[in-house]
Amino acid sequence: MSELTLFDRVIAGEIPVDKVYEDEHILAFRDINPQAPVHVLVIPKQKVRRFAELSEQDPLMVGRLFQGAAHVAHELGLTESGYRIVVNNGEHGQQTVEYIHLHILGGRQLNWPPG
Ligand code: AMP
């Protein structure tokens, strides 16, 4: 069996998080090390290790994750001002937790390009 990650433990309720939204399919919580005034992570309850694995997933699950993130961003009041969705994938993407997560970043003017 593959190793459990931090976010497996969050889903299992073993690690407390600052939850902002939850439904049957996704969980959204504030990042512990925020990079913007609003920095929320959105994860699917059905585990996927990384973005690259989405090609093997049910499109309905992928849609729920992305639509869920848009819903959460809206609930956070970011729709009008705008925001950024970031998914770090693998080593060069600097993914540190091997459980897919969408970063919602907003509440300030963000720069481009990222580092
Ligand atoms: P990534 O670098 O894309 O894998 O993002 C992992 C994110 O998880 C980082 O932004 C961390 O700050 C965040 N993080 C790590 N531990 C926790 C935690 N216990 N609660 C909330 N966010 C966390």
Image (spheres, rainbow, N blue to C red):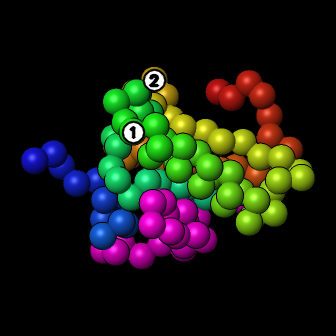
> In 3D space, how far apart are the residues under numbered discs 1 and 2 (Cα atoms)?
26 Å
Q: Is residue 23 above or below residue 34?
A: below
Residue 33 seen anywhere in this rendered image of the structure? no
Q: Residue furthest right?
A: 80
Residue 17 in the image, given as x and y percentages of width and height: 48, 72
Residue at figure coordinates x 38%, y 58% from the top left: 45
Residue 46 can be seen, yes or no: yes
Query: At numbered mark 1, what does the secondary structure look like: helix, strand or loop?
Result: loop
For mark 2, give the secondary structure. Answer: loop
Q: Which residues are magenta?
A: 13-38
Q: Is residue 3 toward the left or the right of residue 69 in the image? A: left
Task: Give amino acid for label 2.
Answer: His
10 Å crowding of disc 1: few (<14), some (14-19), many (20+): few
Res 38 quadrant in image: bottom right
**Residue 110 in picture, x, y percent from top left:** 80, 40
Name the disc covering residue 58, or none: 1
Q: Determine the residue positioned at 77% across, 46% down.
A: 83
Q: Quadrant of the C terminus?
A: top right
> 76 above or below 65?
below
Q: Is residue 91 left or right of residue 8?
A: right
Label 2 packing within 10 angstroms: few (<14), some (14-19), many (20+):
few
Return the residue at label 2.
92
Q: Closest to the observer: 63 or 42?
A: 63
- Taking depth in this image into account, of 79 and 15 the one nearest to the observer is 79
Question: Which three-letter amino acid code belongs to the residue tagged 1?
Answer: Asp
Q: Dominant secondary structure of the magenta stretch? A: loop
Residue at 60% x, 71% y is: 20
Q: Residue at x 34, y 75 (%)?
A: 13
Residue 16 is inside the magenta segment: yes
Mark before the other along the chain sequence, 1 or 2: 1
